[in-house]
Amino acid sequence: AANKKLLVLPGDGIGPEVMREVRRVIDWMSRRRAVSFELEDGLVGGAAIDAEGTPCSDATVEKARNADAVLFGSVGGPKWDGLPFEQRPELGILRLRKELGLFANLRPAKVQDPLADASSLKADLVRGLDIMIVRESTGGIYFGEPRGIETMPDGKRRGIDTEVYTEDEIARVARVAFDLAKKRGGKLCSVEKANVMQSGRLWRAVVGEIGRAEYPEVELTHMYADNCAMQLASRPKQFDVIVASNLFGDLLSDLAAALTGSLGMLPSATLGAVGADGRRAALYEPVHGSAPDITGKGIANPCAQLLSFAMLLRWSFDMDEDATLIEQAVEKVLAGGLRTADIMQPGMARIGTSVMGEAVLRELDKLAA
Ligand code: NAD
Ligand code: IPM
Ligand code: MN
């Protein structure tokens, strides 16, 4: 195959710490699987603010456009919390999603068998859990206008955000979710608040129309977002694929993370449309952030970043076999009783980021032998 161009954006906090473990897997792949990537590094978030004065420069956007896939770490941290809103590190990821047209954020929440007891729920309720949350990621209240803080005639301030969705924005993310449901358990749950939000009313109507016209074989249900949060926290196995707006999808995926044991376990893929040339812009990022509370301690769980790389192999390069190897290696390490602090359980061995990475490499060696 042609060169696989990969842009690596470690970002801030634990981003660079967990990305280091991915680099070791990439080295392993070139040694043992004869796969080579054309790797490029870039700056994003606070790291980019410090070096270039902006959380995501035009040059970085250009590099991302030219790459076949982007592997993203995480951005943000207390060092930059005092900056004006327009200059915050978080704008780095928002800009990349927007400018690359990455409208579908796929957030699988899968409970690894050895971690069923690490869940916030009883093991029985989550064992075997395998949900896919499809979060819209370039629209809604994250980008809607008007927005801002303004001063009213009486001198008091008001903060404004606007939730807007066009039917095309809803339709394209719905199709991604329906396609996934077709390949998985055949069920899609569309989430909004059609009882109080106009964008939610349209969301429900459009998803229903597409379901009837294009995906009659998928079992479609509609659920209010508040109920969905409750259902996820009490009977999560009823779900297969969930599709939701930018904000609701963000909330529900952190909740789903707690069910799987830790935010440190959850990968994601953020995809654009398939272009005329068959290419599809794609960025892969863990669901977690820069975790300032544990930065620099060497204890962050690298699994979410490693599994994001596995998603990259599968979605951007059709490298199913290699992706599965990484997923299996992670599962074997967990089955062997090794745990980073976030997923620590009684009787298990507590290890740090790099020992976890080494353990994954060891399992990869065995699996590929
Ligand atoms: P967070 O996800 O960074 O952390 C939440 C909690 O989960 C913390 O206790 C943290 O220690 C723990 N955690 C997260 N990832 C972990 C891992 N890999 N291993 C072990 N523990 C892990 O969320 P936050 O604290 O609300 O946000 C911190 C900063 O990150 C903020 O600036 C926020 O805006 C940013 N953020 C960025 C992204 C992103 O880059 N995509 C995502 C979420 C938050
Ligand atoms: C995420 C994060 C981001 C979001 C922030 C950092 C902009 O929470 O990727 O889930 O809200 O999308
Ligand atoms: Mn989030």
Image (cartoon, helix red, strand yellow):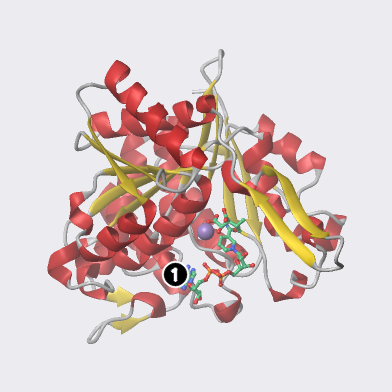
Quarter residue 4 falls in: top right
Q: Residue 298, position in %: x, y?
A: 53, 77
Quarter residue 54 falls in: bottom right
In the image, is residue 96 above or below residue 24?
A: above
Q: Residue 75, position in %: x, y?
A: 65, 61
Q: Residue 67, position in %: x, y?
A: 63, 33
With 176 as the anchor, is 81 left or right in this view? right
Ligand 2 location (quadrant): bottom right
Query: Considering depth in this image, is 196 or 145 the residue closer to the camera?
Result: 196
In the image, is residue 7 above or below residue 302?
A: above
With 5 as the anchor, is 340 left or right in this view? left
In the image, is residue 214 above or below residue 78?
A: above
Q: Is mark 1 within 8 Å of ligand 1?
A: yes
Count of all numbered marks drawn on residues in the image = 1
For label 1, the SS is loop
With 203 as the anchor, is 216 left or right in this view? left
Query: Considering depth in this image, is 301 or 266 the residue closer to the camera?
Result: 266
Give the residue pinned by disc 1. Answer: 301
Crowding at dot 1, Cα within 10 Å, few <14 / some 14-19 / many 20+, comes out as many
Quarter residue 40 falls in: top right
State the residue at coordinates (56%, 35%): 165
State the residue at coordinates (74%, 71%): 81
